[in-house]
Image: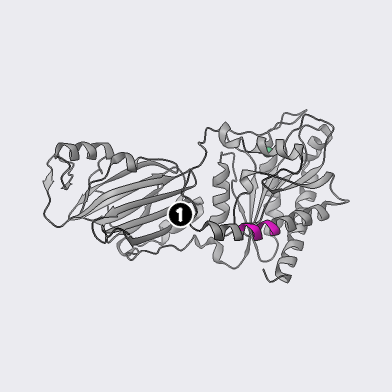
Amino acid sequence: MTAVIRRPLIHAAVLALSLAVSGGAAVAPATDGAATAVMAGPLLAYEARLAGDDARGRLVISFDRKPDYKIHYLANPYRVVVDLPETAFGIKPEDMAARGLFRDVRYGAMGSGAARIVLTATRPVLVTLDDVQAEPDGRGYRLVVDTAISTEADFADRIGKQTWSQAATTGHVAAPPSAGDDGKFVVAIDAGHGGIDAGASGATTNTPEKDVTLAFARELAGVLGGQEGVRVMLTRDKDEFLSLSQRVQLARNQGAKLFISLHADTLKQKDIRGATVYTISDKASDHLAASLAERENLSDEIAGVPLDNGPAEVADILIDLTRRETQAFSVNLARSVVSSFEGQINLINNPHRHAGFRVLQAPDVPSVLLELGFLSNPEDEKLLLDPAWRRKVAERIANAIGQYRATVVANGG
Ligand SMILES: [Zn+2]
């Protein structure tokens, strides 16, 4: 890596001050206190907006003319860097205030005719799209940079591959993380809850649900990972909190073909036991499903995550069509799981139910939520903590996924 930040970038607030002092004129801010008057040359960034939630972000900056830019990544902490030619930032700092995935945003002059924007993320992050478009009103060009959370491994991979001096200059880095491109059938396994959100707890042992789900996720990853042509990804492999939309985004980033969220909740009716498979739906199939979904959806609230108001999906109508198709696949998978469990694993009556689970909202990844059993029922609890039963369940789920894949392939999917 040849480029080194020689001077600290000034903070948005400081920049605002320097712009205010200089009467808002196009001035290249310098950290040595001497505001350097700018000749006709510099690019003018006249408007900006940073939007997003804790899973995705969108940066839009309007320039007076077409900007040349380069995108790089920096580690420790996770940063996305946008390098620009000499630029006067005539934008409102509050429009670039850190939010969602980004905990810090800086921009300013880099000396020797260069400027830079640095977005510091709370988690590994990758640029999913970058593009320059003409402003519809003819007032220049806008740069759009979309970002999404990624895994530690993909971020490290991207850092390792980038040649800082010759990183893509022409935009369209759009390539999604390479992880999904190996032709394998990627299954995302989502251990419910984690970190500050412990989930339910065992009736007799007090074991937190987050531990039960993680143990199951690892077991299932072990069994499924051994199948030919399958690659497994875990949304979490340690005791950490992930918001519901982060779970969905991580699976989508990896090109997941299936998403399985694992849970083991509690009910007031302690005699109810057995496994349930849920798919998403606006209208809950029954009262029990509705109250479970309501409880699962509380996860973000427990951890103090603001409900997302991220960038709207571009083509809603396409998403609707995709969603309908995805829904059919989700139902297929749920049926496969139920039939694979029958006679082997205790099922609740009406074992396939549906409700509005937010973690099942990926428009393009068939998703199910599996309540393995109920921690409120002592017999279920005993099984949920039994490694042999865990193994057996993992094998039945793997079997169901095998059946599902066979039908998808048969239908040309
Ligand atoms: Zn749960």
Q: Is residue 156 visible?
A: yes
Give the structural element (helix, strand or loop) at label 1.
Answer: helix
At x 77%, y 57%, the residue is 400
251 or 66, which lies in front? Answer: 66
Q: Which residue is mark 1?
A: 156
Point out the quarter of the image occupied by ligand 1: top right
Q: Is residue 55 magenta?
A: no
Q: Residue 111: image x %, image y %?
A: 18, 51
Q: What span is colored magenta in the figure?
A: 323-329
Colour scheme of the rendered structure: one colour
Q: Is residue 326 magenta?
A: yes
Q: Residue furthest right?
A: 343
Q: Which quadrant, please, contains the N terminus? A: bottom left
Q: Residue 137: image x %, image y %?
A: 29, 58
Residue 192 picture quarter: top right
226 or 340, which lies in front? Answer: 340
Relative placement, left or right, of 210 versus 253 is right
309 or 320, which lies in front? Answer: 320
Q: Residue 183: image x %, image y %?
A: 59, 68
259 or 364, which lies in front? Answer: 364
At x 81%, y 33%, the residue is 377
- The relative height of residue 341 versus residue 404 in the rendered view (above or below) is above
